[in-house]
Each structure stands twice: as structure tokens, then as C-alpha cells.
Image (cartoon, rainbow, N blue to C red):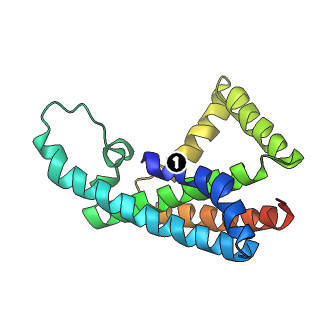
Amino acid sequence: MVLAVLTPFFFVFYDFKKLIYLGASKKDFYFGALVSYGGLALLISLLNTGIHLLIDPLNHTQTVINLMDVCGWMENNVFFAFIQQAVFLLLSMVFLHVLLSMQPHWYGWLTDIILVAIICIFTPIAPLRGLLAGFFKVIMFNPNTLLHIVVCMGLSAALSAAGLAVLKRKTL
């Protein structure tokens, strides 16, 4: 799980400059990053599913909480839980990539301010808190497997398009 969070940091802040200096185009870098995020999401999901099925039952102390249990993805079946986890991880990695890519620009700071404002304003006000909770219910705690997968993939595609627009303006 930590690997899914750290990978966008390396891709945006370390690999981008190196690959561009080696002659890769921005579009090739971004396509490679998205393919890497997809493969990594599948790999992490596969490993976590294996750990959940093989190792967690042996751990009687229950000191480790698995994302699959927290989000309730195992209620349907193992295959769909694996897919749900993979698309959520992909969404998380693409979101972080886009957010980190925008940081040097004014619109990156504006996005940060808007996200902080949403959290600070929506959390204490009950009706807005319900909207925020509803959003997280759809992308994380959704009992409808197909809806969860479609929403996460749709948001990933939209964020990918936004990331491509950000990348076109990015300079070294």
C-alpha cells in the first residue's frame, strides 16, 4: 500500500526529468507512468489479496487491518474484491500524480487550497459532511461492485486527461 502512495512521488519528482533528458517525450513519459500505475495496482492488489487469504487467517492477534476488510470488498467474492482494490489503487496513484504534477504552478496551489477548503468546510457542516461521506462511499465503501469499478475507472480516466493537460504545460 505504501508503494502505491510513494510511486507517484518518484515518477513526478525524479523519473520525469531523467527520462526527458534521455530523450523521451512528455506523452511517452505519461503513457508509461499510467501503464506502470495500472500494472503496479494489479500487482499490489494481487499481493494484498494473497496476504488476506493466506496469511491473515493465521494471524489471530488481528493487529493488521487489511484495506479489503475496511472497505468491505470481500463481501462479493475474491475476484471482484481484487478488481475493486486494483481500480481504487489506480485512482489513488493517478490522483497523486496529477496533484504532484501541478505543484510548481499557480493552479496547483489553487487546487491544494480548494481541497483543504473542502475538507475544512465540509467536515463540520452536517449536510456537506454527508456529501463528502457520500463521495467516499462511492469510491471506497460502495457495496455495488460494478458501480464502484465504473466510477473509479471513470475518475481515473478524467484525472488522466487532466494530467495530460498539466503535463503539456510542464517545463524542466
At horizontal 48% and vertical 62% (from top left) the residue drawn is 87
Question: Toward the viewer: 75 or 53?
Answer: 53
Question: Can residue 145 be seen in this snapshot?
Answer: no
Taking the image as shown, residue 3 lies to the left or right of residue 20, namely left
Within the image, what quadrant is residue 106 found in?
top right
The secondary element bearing badge 1 is classed as helix
Label 1 sits on what residue type? Answer: Val
Residue that numbered label 1 is attached to: 5
Q: Is residue 162 positioned above or below 130 on the image?
A: below
Question: Toward the viewer: 95 or 128?
Answer: 95
Question: Toward the viewer: 171 or 109?
Answer: 171
- Outermost residue, top side: 124
At horizontal 36% and vertical 41% (from top left) the residue drawn is 70
| Residue 105: percent from left, percent from top | 86, 48
Quadrant position of the C terminus in the picture: bottom right
Taking the image as shown, residue 169 lies to the left or right of residue 66, namely right
| Residue 29: percent from left, percent from top | 67, 71
| Residue 3: percent from left, percent from top | 45, 50
Within the image, what quadrant is residue 46 found in?
bottom left
Q: Is residue 167 positioned above or below 66 on the image?
A: below
At horizontal 64% and vertical 68% (from top left) the residue drawn is 157
| Residue 159: percent from left, percent from top | 68, 61
Near mark 1 (Cα within 10 A), the count class, few <14, some 14-19 or many ≥20, is some
Within the image, what quadrant is residue 169 found in?
bottom right
- Outermost residue, right side: 106
Question: Can residue 43 be seen in this snapshot?
Answer: yes
At horizontal 64% and vertical 74% (from top left) the residue drawn is 31
